[in-house]
Image: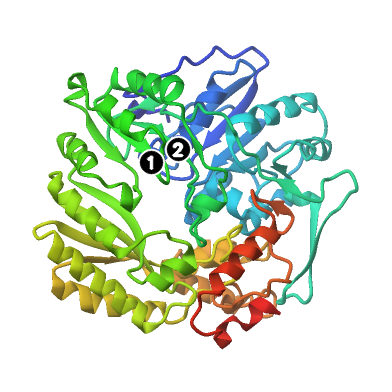
């Protein structure tokens, strides 16, 4: 079922006519078209494949698809959101592919996955994939296709053995995980063969030309938006933050050879521009970039910017955005407590946060969105009071500016110094407490679902044993109740919810991703963990397992 949705696309690249013996490949996004086509990562990989003459690529979404090959050799998935695993399993079944890798044979396509979710921790999903690409697609994708061509006619097992030699390609079936007990810690993770690398290294692209949209369409979730990646990673290194630690080092796109040409290309087909990156305003030439976009010829352009660093919110930035149809800015402050900000390495003072509100209002913006977090390791009751006091001061300093405070629960993430901490059991109560105190102040409090944080933590720290659980929850529905029901059914066969979500892990135990190397070695993460805990008021009992 091809669709008129594809007909509304304006392509910013020229697809190649594939050779007669091109590899038939399906590239899927496990969600609806409007969501998938808004993913810059998905757009880039699809365009890269479509510009190769040795590949014939067809796109597949949950609601529509291009004409699919009768016998695809490769099926790939780009995964941006954990809970989309349900759609992956459904899509595999719709293609008549067994959902578990070990049940596939030479007649089935090779199933690969990539994207932020799998690069962070592929283990809960490992049994569903033949191949996982860890890291940036820029070099990895080409190396993958070239290696596959060498063994295209070989049996599946030989193909997998060859692909395992490519840096950044992880073949889960070639690693054996042993457990102390079926429901206990991991004992070891070893390659099954001496020629399979013991450690797979995430791949990092180090060029200064970053990504930009390859397609613009009114059917995208952000209608007609053209996206430009201004920076990759973040120099701040907040200790809980996957977006920073997993993607290090911080890289910036060159203004002359990357950003300006990309923006000109995009604004030739649309007047909606999105600047992307974890810390866009920390680009060393950000002011020049703003001046460039402020030219009269771009007066009609609507500009949106991803989260900006609080102390870079100047009156000029606010004015430029207000003129370009942006009504509010987003800043991540995490907490109003100085102590907590030291623990997480957030280099910010309350007066800088209050100044950001004053500048936003002075520049003509009508609102400021703040991101905060409860349950940060080391948090105590007075830290929540400090957040409420800070929000009150902002309200007073910038009367009439609409303040909203989005608040999540701390979730441990792999490859960060806080990967050993569990989710704080008091977090749900603390969200309710903030709600009670901030609502009467006229501050729009938007808590993220605590139950979703629990599921996120489970998938973020999960190991391979979770694949059984994920198959069950798919039949039960993806609410927290379904996960609890599945845990009950698997009691004794896998660890309980508590082990994955709330327990502080020992720094000496084998982690599910111990065989997958992120940008920083474990010794550096431990050093950063020590720095964080040195700011704790009391070495509370909660933390004992960490030091064992």
Q: Determine the residue positioned at 74% across, 75% down.
A: 182
The tag on residue 280 is 1
Instruction: Identify the residue shown where x is 47% and y is 52%.
Output: 236
> Could you give the CA–CA distance between mark 2 and mark 1, rounded to whole angstroms?
6 Å
Q: Quarter of the image holding residue 39?
A: top left
Element carrying mark 1:
helix
Q: Position of residue 394 (x, y in %)?
A: 19, 64
Q: Under tag 2, what secondary structure?
A: strand
The front one of 252 and 414 is 252
Along the line of sight, the residue nearer the viewer: 429 or 146: 429
Residue 432 visible in the shown view: no
Question: What residue is at 17 percent from the left and 37 percent from the top?
Answer: 325
Q: Residue at x 59, y 72 (%)?
A: 500
Q: Is residue 523 left or right of residue 236?
A: right
Q: Residues within 10 Å of mark 2 (few under 14, many from 20)?
A: many
Residue lying at the far bottom of the rendered structure: 541
Q: Relative to 142, is 457 above or below? A: below
Task: Name the residue beneath numbered marker 2.
Answer: 231
Q: Residues within 10 Å of mark 1 (few under 14, many from 20)?
A: many
Q: Position of residue 284 (x, y in %)?
A: 41, 35
Q: Are marks 2 and 1 in contact (CB under 8 Å)?
A: yes
x%, y% of residue 487?
Answer: 58, 75
Image quarter in which the N terminus is found: top left
């Amino acid at each position: 079922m091809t669709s008129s949705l594809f007909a509304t696309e304006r392509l910013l690249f020229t697809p190649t006519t594939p050779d007669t013996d091109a590899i038939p490949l399906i590239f899927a996004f496990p969600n609806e078209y409007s969501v998938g086509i808004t993913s810059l990562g998905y757009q880039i990989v699809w365009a890269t494949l479509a510009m190769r003459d040795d590949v014939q690529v067809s796109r597949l979404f949950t609601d529509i698809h291009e004409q699919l090959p009768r016998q695809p050799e490769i099926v790939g998935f780009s995964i941006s959101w954990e809970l989309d695993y349900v759609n992956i399993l459904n899509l595999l079944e719709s293609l008549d592919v067994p959902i578990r890798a070990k049940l596939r044979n030479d007649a089935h396509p090779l199933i690969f996955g990539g994207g932020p979710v799998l690069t962070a921790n592929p283990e809960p999903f490992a049994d569903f994939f033949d191949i996982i690409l860890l890291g940036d697609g820029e070099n990895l994708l080409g190396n993958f296709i070239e290696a596959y061509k060498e063994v295209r006619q070989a049996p599946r097992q030989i193909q997998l053995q060859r692909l395992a030699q490519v840096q950044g390609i992880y073949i889960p079936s070639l690693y054996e995980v042993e457990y102390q007990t079926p429901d206990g810690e991991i004992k070891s993770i070893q390659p099954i063969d001496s020629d399979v690398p013991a450690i797979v290294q995430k791949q990092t692209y180090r060029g200064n030309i970053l990504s930009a949209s390859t397609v613009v369409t009114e059917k995208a979730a952000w209608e007609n938006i053209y996206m430009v990646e201004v920076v990759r990673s973040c120099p701040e290194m907040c200790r809980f933050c996957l977006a920073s630690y997993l993607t290090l080092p911080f890289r910036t796109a060159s203004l002359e050879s990357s950003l300006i040409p990309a923006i000109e290309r995009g604004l030739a087909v649309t007047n909606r521009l999105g600047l992307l990156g974890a810390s866009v305003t920390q680009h060393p030439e950000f002011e020049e970039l703003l001046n460039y976009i402020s030219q009269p010829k771009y007066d009609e352009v609507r500009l949106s910017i991803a989260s900006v660093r609080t102390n870079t919110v100047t009156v000029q930035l606010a004015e430029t955005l207000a003129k370009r149809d942006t009504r509010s800015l987003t800043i991540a402050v995490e907490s109003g407590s100085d102590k907590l900000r030291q623990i997480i390495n957030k280099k910010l003072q309350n007066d800088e946060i209050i100044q950001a509100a004053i500048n936003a209002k002075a520049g003509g913006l009508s609102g400021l969105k703040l991101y905060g977090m409860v349950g940060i390791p080391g948090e105590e009751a007075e830290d929540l009071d400090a957040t409420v006091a800070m929000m009150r001061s902002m309200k007073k300093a910038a009367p009439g500016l609409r303040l909203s405070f989005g608040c999540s629960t701390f979730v441990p993430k792999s490859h960060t110094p806080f990967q050993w901490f569990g989710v704080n059991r008091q977090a749900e109560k603390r969200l309710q407490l903030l709600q009670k105190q901030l609502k009467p102040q006229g501050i729009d409090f938007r808590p993220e679902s605590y139950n979703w944080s629990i599921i996120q933590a489970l998938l973020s720290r999960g190991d391979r044993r979770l694949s059984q659980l994920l198959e069950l929850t798919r039949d039960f529905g993806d609410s927290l109740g379904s996960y609890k029901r599945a845990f009950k059914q698997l009691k004794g066969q896998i660890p309980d919810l508590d082990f994955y979500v709330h327990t502080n892990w020992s720094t000496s135990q084998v982690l599910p991703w111990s065989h997958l190397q992120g940008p920083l070695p474990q010794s550096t993460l431990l050093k950063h963990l020590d720095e964080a805990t040195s700011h704790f008021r009391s070495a509370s009992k909660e933390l004992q397992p960490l030091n064992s």
